[in-house]
Image (tube, rainbow, N blue to C red):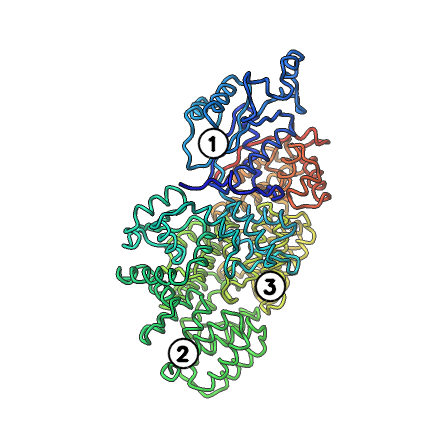
Amino acid sequence: MAVELGADWPVTTDWPFAAREAELAEIERSVDTGVGVLLVGDAGVGKSALLRAALARAERGGAQVVRLEELTEPPLAALPGHSREARRAGHLRGRCRSGAKRRVIAWADDLHLLDGARLELAHRLVNAGQVVLLAATPSHRPLPDLIRQLSLKKLIRRLTVGTLDRSGTARVLAAWLGGPVAADTVEELWTLTHGSALVLRELTEHALAEGSLRQVQDSWRWPGLSGAPDSRLVDLAELLLGELDQDERELVGMLALAGHLEAGLPVVAGLGEAAEALNRRGVVVTERSGFRLSLRLAYPFCAAVVAASLPELTARRLRQRIADTLEDTGARRAGDAVRIARLRLATGWIPEPSRLRATTLGVLHDQDYPLAERLCRAALAAGAAAADPRWELLLAEAVIGQARHAEAEARLARTAGTAAPAGLLRLRVLNLAFGLRRPAEAEALVAEAESGPAGSVAGAGEVADARSLLRLLAGRPDGIREAGSPAGLAVLALARHELGDDEGALEALRDAHEDDSEARLERLVLAGRIALHTRGEAEATALLDCPDGDDDGPRHRMHVALLEARIHRGAGRTARAVDLLRQAAVYRGPDEWLATRAERLAQLAGALAESGESAEAAAVLDEARAAVESLPYPVAADEVALEHALVLAQLGDRTAAARQALKVAERAGAAGRRTQALAALHLAARAGAAAKAAALLPPDPPAGSAAPAGLSAARTAHVRALADGDGDALDATAACFERLGLLPLAAEAAAMAARAHQAAGGHRKSRASRVRSSELVSRCDHGLPDWAVDEGRREVGAQTELTSREREVVTLAVSHLSNQEIAAQLVLSVRTVENHLYRAYAKLGVATRGELAHRLVKRPGRTH
């Protein structure tokens, strides 16, 4: 039987309550209509904290709150102020601050622990309409019949309290730590906790106490769990796992070491009853992939603690048992061979020479660089380098993956003096340019290779590809004319895309038929990006749904997440885009030309700003700017600068945003990067500098030449329509964006069309454009940016015209929180809160805080 946490685990009262605004608002709406709420969720998700926050908000609003366990017969006698004399004096009919009848709320935490008499009392009071019930109960507990009856009568409703998502985790951490938290630290903590508020609190307090969680350059950073966990973390893991019998303990140990196990494996089938029991209690969860069903522990934190706490001999036995089972079943899943090797290597086993290279390649693919280095050194010690010089390259890759770039360059330089293996030049160029930040030395290296003795065709092709890569890194794609080998086609395709030749880029990708997984991945990513740019969301999504190959390594997951996020962000599904970008931003592999760490962080910052998370957007943007500062890669630097401009615009500084975007446009245009320059001009025009942006647009191509298509054409038309104030052209641009599946841009263009029509006296056209814009906004996660909202046509109570942050501030203000309390909860300064309220007053047409409740229209959120 699972252990309940509510009664046995202490609650830290100063842990911040955050990231539950939607649930609080839903509880408030329900209570306002006289319907109680039963909070249902797994142990540790924060039901009790949410209940306390809801009660505090109700009490501030004038409701009378009393604990259900403290009620006695007759029902109202125990309520403060509800003696017979008080009732006779009319206290029961007193009014709260909003003017409504004074409501009485009875509450109970751990409703399932109440005795029958208390449940009967609650049932009678709620039925009589004398109280509204707020309560919490674990999800795995059956509801008492009396509470079910109230639910059937719609006198109480269930509200499932889920775990925190990644954004919620970031907000809770920032509130608790009092400052921004690095993106990789947020992801590390979310990965271990899967959003459990209880586990997050304990891990954070543990990391603070041991000093591993600390501020570095104004951001809180944590390297993760290391070493043996302390006794409190072990106690928490045991509490979450509950009491385990021998078979359950065996299965938990194997899952902790293996991460996941297929349900059909004999080792799992033999513990079938234990698996079912653990699954019923929520200790083990199932995940389906195609026809395969896998098991894993519900809390990765528990897996980490159990794996670190197992006695050495027990861990050795379990690893061997899992490896034997996987081998006996044929290791049929992708990656099983590497899993087997990793399990056996942890017991001290070294694979035989015939399997050593394949094992090492698999471990490198999974980016377990320390283990790969160990295997490489074992092979070299056995004399493998004499038979196969590629072992030196594998060792260099493992060393580069651990950020020991100088050591890798020294080893690669020595290898270059012998029979140099294929791939050596490319690896040295990337290590010098990205790892050591010494592009001049990389340039000299390629020049030396070009002037050296004529080599093989493959060698000449490798030199040509290295030269193309350096030109791309220098921000000069116009110098890249052809690929030296099939492996260089991805660089050629990106260069043509940047030059504005999307059809040429797609043609280059169609010529790529590499068996190498890295080449296939680069082809998929670039094809998806260009398809989104030229033909829209549907075609890009189709490519994503049918990837070339079934690779599932960390690099593959990062690039696919980036592409998927680009699609979702363009379509207005910002919440999903933010989630994917959080995962991509913390990829731990070496920096690369196709997606640098700075670019990934910058994209996350831009998506956060679009979704209203302005404080975190600014903090992540600082990380991105620091990452790009010493990276000599103009394409990446300008990508970061563009996202910086977008964040500035979303935060309200449109002048600075337009100025920065125009600078990017000038730099990119001078280097021939037409696509990036046009993106910058488009942003500058949207931020208010349409005339300047239109003046910098490249001239139309001569007759007979291919005209820009897809997003390039739409951006060009949008800039010109904004500069001309042409409502009809803006309507046409909105339709073009909608055909491409870019709904936020379509909604924005339609809103600007409404404004242009209104200015020209076309009231009917203006209304039609405004209606179209509202319909498009309703299909997105977020509303229009401030610059697209018609200041002269703001409707009272039009909540879509408030920014996400303004809605948060207004919602808390309506709940009678002071500016100081709002600032503390949202991790803002009091001055910022005041500014948000001032702008909200103007948008809603009110002059005081007291009018907000009457003016603000509350609407249920959409589900996406």
> Residue 152's x, y, as percent?
43, 24
Front-most of residues 246 and 77: 246
In this figure, which residue is indicated by the disc labeled 1?
113
Q: Which mark is residue 390?
A: 2
> Residue 235's x, y, as percent?
49, 49
> Residue 512's x, y, as percent?
39, 67
Q: Secondary structure at mark 2?
A: helix
Q: Is residue 511 visible?
A: no
> Residue 117's x, y, as percent?
47, 22
Q: Residue at position x 55%, y 49% from top?
A: 202
Q: Earlier in the sequence, mark 3 or mark 1?
A: 1
Q: Secondary structure at mark 3?
A: helix
Q: Name above or below for residue 418 compared with residue 148.
A: below
Q: Name above or below for residue 320 compared with residue 713.
A: below
Amino acid type, label 2? Arg
In this figure, which residue is indicated by the disc labeled 3?
627
